[in-house]
Amino acid sequence: MMTTPLLMKGIDKWLSRRLNGPEENDEKPWVEDDKPQVIVVGFGRFGQVIARLLMANKMRITVLERDIGAVNLMRKYGYKVYYGDATQVELLRSAGAEAAESIVITCNEPEDTMKLVALCQQHFPHLHILARARGRVEAHELLQAGVTQFSRETFSSALELGRKTLVSLGMHPHQAQRAQLHFRRLDMRMLRELIPEHSDMVQISRAREARRELEEIFQREMQQERRQLDGWDEFE
């Protein structure tokens, strides 16, 4: 049983050499068109959308993926893919991290995300880091690590569905859009102000304060809209 981790690591290295091949390692000299603009780590449901959007807009991307089946499938569709563990510096270097402008981290495990963030900051400080956050805790960790460009995977979709719900209840689409934007800004501000070490009571108190602030914003907007409507009445 003690040899199993070493055996698996050896198999992983062998697969990496076999799948990445000599034509895709750093023995081949880079030309300008080969240099990726973006490295996308992970090609799951989250990473696929990002990679497809970038490819559709003619961006040069390289994908790092640990699933062999996904690697082979992506290569059939023209993606430049490296198989292996993205938290290994040499794999990042072989994939073009020194030449890339940005890296998009879409790991499933928060621990892998934070390890990769630290690795990039240490070895490739020029990279613009963008990351997937599974929830608020990981979002806090990313902010503390200096990563400000991240997306909470359920937040945006939930907020969009909330906007549609407001419209279905009779709110004007423009007003619902503003409500969505206000909520997003306020929630991000709360995220920056609250750190994981705060007690639950502090977070509850801050959440109540934020809710009151949001209600005041909506009330001011409604009053402003009423004044605008009253102004139009003068021309009737």
Image: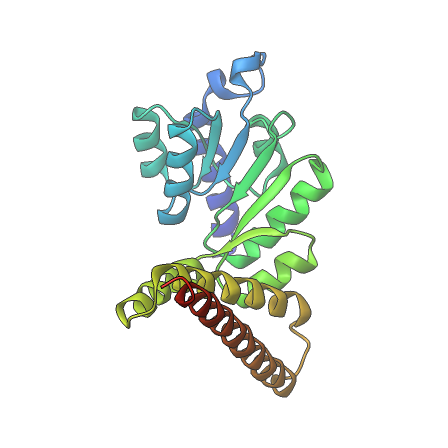
- Where 144 falls versus 44 (above or below)? below
Give the tally of numbered discs: 0
- At x 69%, y 35%, the residue is 124
Residue 123 position, x and y percent, is 71, 37
Report the front residue among 148 and 199: 148
- Where 49 falls versus 179 (above or below)? above
- Specify the farthest residue to the bottom: 201
Report the front residue among 210 and 12: 210
Residue 125 position, x and y percent, is 72, 38
Report the front residue among 128 and 87: 128
Residue 138 position, x and y percent, is 56, 62
- In the picture, measured across the screen, residue 174 lies left or right of residue 6, that is left
- Where 177 falls versus 24 (above or below)? below
- In the picture, measured across the screen, residue 216 lies left or right of residue 48, that is right
- At x 53%, y 21%, the residue is 25
Image quadrant where residue 153 sits: bottom left
- At x 57%, y 45%, the residue is 130
**Quadrant housing the C terminus:** bottom left
